[in-house]
Amino acid sequence: IPASLAAVPPPAANLAAAAITAAEEPARLGPARPPLEPRTTPEPIAQASAFRRVMPHTGARGALAAGPPGTRAVIGWSQKSSVLEYEAQRLRSFSHAHARAEQSKAAAIERRMQLRARVLPTLDHLRTTGALDECNAAVESLSADTIELESRVRAHAQALAVREDELGARAAAAEGALERSDLLSEIGLLSQTNEALESLGQSLDVARDASAQQSVRADEAQAALARLVWWSAGGEEDELVADVDVKLSMRIGAMRELLGAARARVLERLDELPELTRRTAAARAQLGALQQRLSEEQASSAAPCGTRRTRLRALTPAQEARVAATWDPPYPKQPTLVEYESQPVSKYDLSTLRGLEWLNDEVLNLYLKLVLKKASEELHQHGGADAARAPLRTHIMQTFFYSKLMDEKDTKRFTYDNVKRWTKKVDLFALDAVLVPINSCSDHWVLVVLNMRQKRLEYFDSLGGDATEFFRNLRAYLEHEHQDKKGTPIDLSDWTEHHWEVPQQNNGSDCGVFMCQFASSVIRNIVINFTCADMRYMRKRMVIEILDLQLLDDSDVED
């Protein structure tokens, strides 16, 4: 195409090109044709256009070879135009991409500068102050405590599993005891199991409180670390810190991991403890139901003593306040708070009535003296009417009488001479009963009653132990006592022995309270009206009775 046609618009250029091609190649075009009509499309161009419409996928060379004559110039110009347009578009796209890349690079540099401006002052602060050390110490302490808590809770879980297995075995044994009518030993074993479950429940409460406290500590440590290290792990700030100070970055990462593990342990314990508490409560409920069943079976047996029925009276608010004041520490052994018949009691002695403490001899001896005093008053008021309901004329031995009789400190044998002068002013055989409190194995109080009126030996034990040895030794004591005081032997062959089924304790601490209340019921001829559930009340009541040197009255219940 001549240069003079370069600026011609595509339609005009196509017409001129077709005319020149026709003039230069007469052989191919054939004979001359008539002049073109004005405003008509040149035939070669029309043919080329029609051919391209018919065969749109044929390449340029195929079009030249197969198309009608005169189409070479038209298709060639079209190809060159497409190439130029493509190149221009490619250059424009490259220019735009380059501009965008430059803009992104500039924005990244600006963002990096802003990031450094935010983070670097914080790093300088962490390097120059001890705040991070303090936070790290708190996190390490929390981690150690959570590890200890985790160990404790796991130990509680194992202990609970053991108690659940033990409870299942005890339940099976209790079923056999019901069939054999041998309840006392099983009730005692169930009481020990209940004590263990109660202790476990208290430990779980402590662990739950510790978990809650450690959860608060974990939140505080998390907040403290967030204030110092305000950026999140894995972000741009974290990458910058790793580039600037590798050691500091590693330390922060270790703190995060340690705190995360500690928080996870706390949350796991908080999730686990309710289930352990629920299982403990379920085990105690099962145990309570079993104890109730055994107690009902036991209650159906003959009453061991008493014809009067009474109902316990609640303490007044003023009495409750007196008990609380008496139990407030400290607990000095001097001065003496009260004294009765040469038996002093101090605030220290009364403190043994608190909680699950063991009662000491001072409290036991004074209280038993008060029981005798109350029985004497009631006997005087009774006036001899209806002797079956009257209190018993009784003598109570001191709490260390039996240990002296058995010479437990020296020969550990029956030694009547150690106690024969104890009754020089008392004729035991003229009384209705003699009560002998015994500290069995130095850790459990039981009561043996020598019932002179009905000629029998009676045994009261809140743990259902065996009385064979006690009965044998006290029979020997009666024989020696009668020979010494009356000068003649006594025939005890018609005396019977009774191991009464009485309310059982559910711990290892209330035996002294049970023994005192058994003595009161026997002497005052009252049907036993208390259970293990009343022991906390009984302890408070005994404090008031000792302070006032007078047993409280209960309301009578009509038969």
Image (cartoon, grey):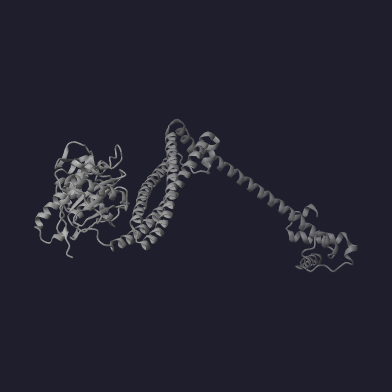
Viewport quadrant of the C terminus: bottom left
| Horizontal arrangement in the rendering, residue 542 relative to residue 532 (left or right) | left
Camera-side residue: 421 or 58? 421
256 or 320: nearer the eye? 320
Q: Residue 166 location in percent, x, y? A: 42, 54
* Residue 363 visible in the picture: yes
Residue 339 falls in which quadrant of the image? top left
Residue 510 visible in the displayed image: no
Query: Which residue of the protein is positioned furthest toward the front in this rendering?
Result: 488
Instruction: Answer with left or right where residue 398 lies relative to residue 508.
Output: left
Q: Position of residue 120 (x, y in %)?
A: 49, 35
Vertical order, 285 against 546 (above or below): below
- Would you place residue 389 above or below residue 360 in this image? below
Q: Quadrant of residue 365?
A: top left
Is residue 282 or residue 147 the one in the foreground? 282
Give percent across and percent down for residue 352.
Answer: 25, 43
